[in-house]
Amino acid sequence: MKRLLSRLASDRGGASAIELALALPVLITMIYGIFTLGQLFEADASVQHALGEGVRYATLCLNPTSSGVCTIPTDTQITTKITSKLFGPAAGLTPTITTDTTAKTKTITLTYTTTPNFLLFNGPSVTMTRSRVVYYAH
């Protein structure tokens, strides 16, 4: 009997299965957390890209006449351009456009808010706000 107990105590056949059972939930949670953070970076890249496209579009001279008079894009046209360039988790955002006629500027702002889910718990609410100022001289 003593010999059998000593042999069972030294048997390490199931040790790797127990280690896997303890480590696997932690590993999966960490991988999912990295994926969730990747989505935040993707949303930030989407907002930056769409704002860049919208700002570039807002500075264009649409339908120039022979006398050199330009038509600047409307806020609706700029909004359409920005929303068409958004991708990933930020695809449903709508920009806020503020016009200052005295300084001849438009301020375009996009805000993305989400609450990351890390499988076992929800993270804190994350809000990313990006703004660009466009000067138009037309």
Image (tube, grey):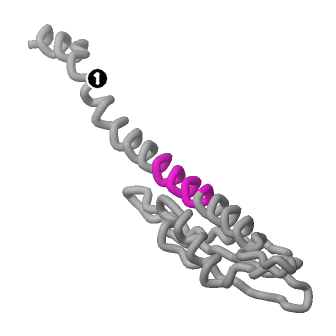
The N terminus appears in which quarter of the rendering?
A: top left
Residue topped by disc 1 = 16
Q: Is residue 109 above or below residue 6?
A: below
Q: Taking 6 as reference, is 138 left or right?
A: right
| Magenta segment boundaries in residue numbering | 33-45
The residue located at (67%, 84%) in the rendering is 74
In x, y percent, where is residue 18?
Answer: 27, 30
Looking at the image, residue 129 sits to the left or right of residue 26; the answer is right
Across and down, in percent, residue 100 comes to 83, 89
Q: Secondary structure at mark 1?
A: helix
In the rendered image, which quarter is residue 56 located in?
bottom right
For image coordinates 28% across by 23% down, the residue present is: 16
- Residue 35 colored magenta? yes
Can you say which quadrant of the picture contains the C terminus?
bottom right
Residue furthest to the front: 66
82 over 14 or under it: above or below: below
Q: Is residue 37 left or right of residue 109?
A: left
Percent across and percent down for residue 23 are: 37, 35
Which quarter of the figure has residue 57?
bottom right
Position in image of residue 92 (x %, y %) = 48, 72
Q: Please state which amino acid type lies under the numbered disc 1.
A: Ser
Toward the right, the furthest residue is 103
Q: 118 or 17: nearer the eye?
A: 118
Residue at 11% x, 12% y is 4
Main structural element of the magenta stretch: helix, strand or loop?
A: helix
Q: Residue at x 15, y 16 (%)?
A: 5
